[in-house]
Image: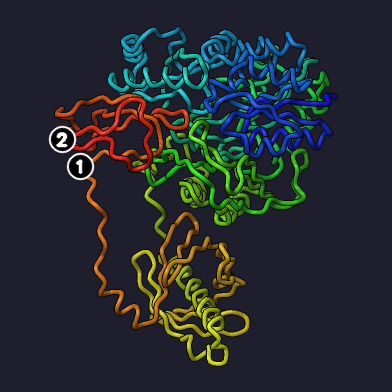
Amino acid sequence: MFDKILIANRGEIACRVIKTARKMGISTVAIYSDADAKALHVQMADEAVHIGPPPANQSYIVIDKVMEAIKSSGAQAVHPGYGFLSENAKFAEALEAAGVAFVGPPKGAIEKMGDKITSKKIAQEAGVSTVPGYMGLIEDADEAVKISNEIGYPVMLKASAGGGGKGMRIAWNDEEAREGFQSSKNEAANSFGDDRIFIEKFVTQPRHIEIQVLCDAHGNGIYLGERECSIQRRNQKVVEEAPSPFLDEATRRAMGEQSVALAKAVGYTSAGTVEFIVDGSKNFYFLEMNTRLQVEHPVTELITGVDLVEQMIRVANGEPLSLSQDDVKLHGWAIENRLYAEDPYRGFLPSIGRLTRYRPPAESPDYQPGVVPQAPVVRNDTGVYEGGEISMYYDPMIAKLCTWGPDRATAIEAMRVALDRFEVEGIGHNLPFLAAVMDHPKFVNGNMTTAFIEEEYPDGFEGVTLAEADLRRVAAACAAMHRVAEIRRTRISGRMDNHERKVGTDWNVTVQGQSYDVTIAADHDGSTVTFDDGGTLRVSGDWTPGDAIADMVVDGGALVLKVGKVSGGFNIRTRGAELKVHVRTPRQAELARLMPEKLPPDTSKMLLCPMPGLVVKVDVEEGQEVQEGQALCTIEAMKMENILRAEKKGTVSKINAGAGDSLAVDDVIMEFE
């Protein structure tokens, strides 16, 4: 077995590989850019090597620099993680020439299946059903428009060397095909150093289901079930689960056997994933093969008890698989939510900055990859820590929160609680959105497609509105918590003997536009909160002022609240809702109703930068009349290009930024008459 492995990656996947290597007794080497000098993966590794400036194309994907790090560290093998150089055949070739083991497939398999155009041709030749499309190289935007018309809109423009949603655009007409072609080329060049683009038919209402395969160099190959990855945003997965709530055993077996056959046809070794789109009749179509470890691999590990990273290392060491297909059993259900540094209220645009608070829910202490869970599990794969920075140079994913249960309902409920317990402050994040998805009827019923977010949130995510019954539970809990805080306040002031007189029983609670007059009757076990309509709720819990998480029980049901203090009440996050709750005495409530409402400033005649980023280009000039939907400028953030468009007809009166300028959130890019 290897003595030392270098991880040619960063963030949570580097930390993930380090954990398994440590379990196997293998020392690890991290590499890092200037931006990652204090990163978690650098702290976790046994040693670390600096490889250059922050941009990936000057550090993490520069093969010569990585090879120098391997040589200087004496690493015998390299695990590439995902992204960066993980599917780069030239990197695999350089490792082979240097006598260093690649913890991944052979160079030939990467070349054949890692390239989306080549892989589709091979799949077609092998008799695998594929989506209609144009597999040749496309020279320019005019040719892209012509091909798109021949295939028929809508079409998907995809980077040949792409992955992770980079270099992908859906086009519904000629204008979008033209714009999408150029943006896809730019993103592909910046992210992968390869700007080749191909086009395929975009199948509406599909499910995205992928098969995990594992092959060795001795001719053995198995599949480890499937993952449902249909909930996607901008072609990037957000929620994954295993198994799929849609597949039956016959379809699972057919997809699995086909995936293994395809892998063997190209001499594949290591872990890999074959992706399919599946229609409502369970017909499946090959999309691509990812010749690497997938972001969502933890859900497969949770339901199979197989440590995929360990298996990859053992295969790279020349060992045969210790598992046969008959040994693979699926146990229970697992769900993964990807926590991103992005603002769901601003169209999910990236958010950067310092994590002033980062407290994930406690992981299950007895669980580790390679073991089948026996009780509900919480697992959090992360690469950040409290006080660390979220950089603009890399993917905005903060963590992968996973839960396992003996059935799907249990896994979902465990995820709901885990999301409510997750504390993130200092940046925008998608925790409220993830919580909303976990409660959405379509998700709960397993009735989702890749159009889920587009269909259910057509105007973007605007937050969660709690039902009346849930609001009353929050109101009752906050009233009881406020009473505890008031008692604490009177004790601190030295009035312990008469604090009961100082803290009243009648209160008014306002939340989400609703106002509740309540009376609290407290005893040693909790409080009974009576509403003015006669309804009562029993509240108990051990919350004390200053706690950021309140584990409450309301009428026998658990209620987890993320708590922030504001004057006269709380900022509350629960089940995706972010609420400002005020608890006042009757007199304070009466006076509060007389206060005028503070109106936000008028920015309707300004184009504000929705996220920190770099201006790629400005498409208009001062004095130019623009139409609704017209492209105004392009902002690049976290390797993604975002085209900002006019919301209505108008005339540009002033432009405040140009190509190459770095902007902060809400910087004024241009103004209109």
Name the residue located 51 percent from the left edge and 36 percent from the top edge: 391
- How many C-alpha atoms fall within 10 Å of the one at disc 1: few (<14), some, or many (≥20)? some
Residue carrying label 2? 650
Name the residue located 33 percent from the left edge and 12 percent from the top edge: 141
* 113 to 645, vertically: above or below: above
Q: Amino acid at mark 2?
A: Gly
- How many C-alpha atoms fall within 10 Å of the one at disc 2: few (<14), some, or many (≥20)? some
Which residue occupies the foreground of this view, 160 or 150?
160
Which quarter of the figure is the N terminus placed in? top right
Which residue occupies the foreground of this view, 276 or 298?
298
Place of residue 265 in the rendered image (x, y in percent of width and height, measured from the top left): 67, 11
Look at the numbered discs 1 and 2 and tell me whether their residues touch, using CB distance below 8 Å: yes
- The disc, 1 or 2, on the residue closer to the chain's N-terminal end is 1
Residue carrying label 1? 605
Cα–Cα span, label 1 and label 2 = 9 Å
Name the residue located 48 percent from the left edge and 29 percent from the top edge: 279
Place of residue 488 in the rendered image (x, y in percent of width and height, measured from the top left): 55, 79
* 592 to 25, vertically: above or below: below
Place of residue 591 in the rendered image (x, y in percent of width and height, measured from the top left): 29, 78
Is residue 8 at least partly visible in the picture? yes
The image quarter containing residue 615 is: top left
Is residue 286 at least partly visible in the picture? no
Q: Amino acid at mark 1?
A: Lys
Name the residue located 38 percent from the left edge and 75 percent from the top edge: 516
In this picture, residue 31 sits left or right of residue 279: right
